[in-house]
Amino acid sequence: MKSILGVASAVLLAISLASCGSTAAATSPSSPTATPKPTTYYGETATAIAALIPDCTDVKAGDVAKGGPGLVSIGSCVLGGRTVDVYSWADRSAEVSMGTLLRANKEAVTYASGTGWSAFVRRDMTFQWQLTNQADKLLAAAWNHASATAPDLPGELEVSKKIADALGGQVNQYQPTS
């Protein structure tokens, strides 16, 4: 009888240990994995950056023309029905110098930026022609009394957030002072 109890005890012990192991494996939490953000860098082409933005379609290269110092390239794409212009920069100082133009325009604007790039919802071509030093096109638009479309600041904020989230950048809001 002792041998039967000994065998039974050994079997119960083995079953207990086996079930503890499987219970622990079934209840151990799995750690969530964060989705890595694409890495961008100074000097990267704007079309390559635009192609990294999820749901951004119709990626096209733009014309840098006589672009200011440090403007590497221009690309555009369509995101949520809005055309987005992506500007790539040679270095941080070139990117920061764009602020001078924003201040000179004295218009509220929301945009996304990150390492080596800035992305704006296109209102019209004025800003791009300013960045690329195309005075002839700016003059022609003035002569034709071309008026800019009213800014869609909530739409600019929505698109800027999507881009900043996708590329690990930030949203910037420029408000002119009176």
Image: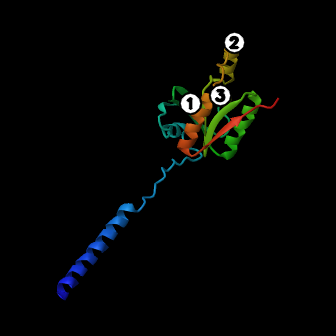
Residue lying furthest bottom in this view? 2
Crowd band around label 3 with a 10 angstrom C-alpha radius: few (<14), some (14–19), many (20+): some
The answer to whether the residues at label 2 and label 3 have Cβ atoms under 8 Å apart is no
What's the residue at 46%, 55% (across, down)?
32
Q: Position of residue 46 (x, y in %)?
A: 55, 37
Residue 96 percent location from the top left of the image: 70, 41
**Residue holding disc 2:** 145
Q: Residue at x 72, y 32 (%)?
A: 102
Residue 174 visible in rendering: yes
Q: Position of residue 147 (x, y in %)?
A: 67, 16
Q: Tell me the kind of residue under disc 2.
A: His
Q: Nearer the viewer, residue 83 or 125?
A: 83
- Nearest the camera: 51 or 150? 150
Q: Nearer the viewer, mark 1 or mark 3?
A: 3
Say which mark, if any, is on residue 84.
Answer: 1
Question: Residue placed farthest to the right in the image?
Answer: 178
Where's residue 9, x and y in %?
Answer: 25, 80
Residue 165 against residue 78 in the figure, above or below: below
Q: CA distance from mark 2 to mark 3?
A: 23 Å
Closer to the chain start, of discs 1 and 2, is 1
Earlier in the chain: of badge 2 and badge 3, it is: 2
Q: Which residue is mark 3?
A: 153
Q: Is residue 167 left or right of residue 14?
A: right
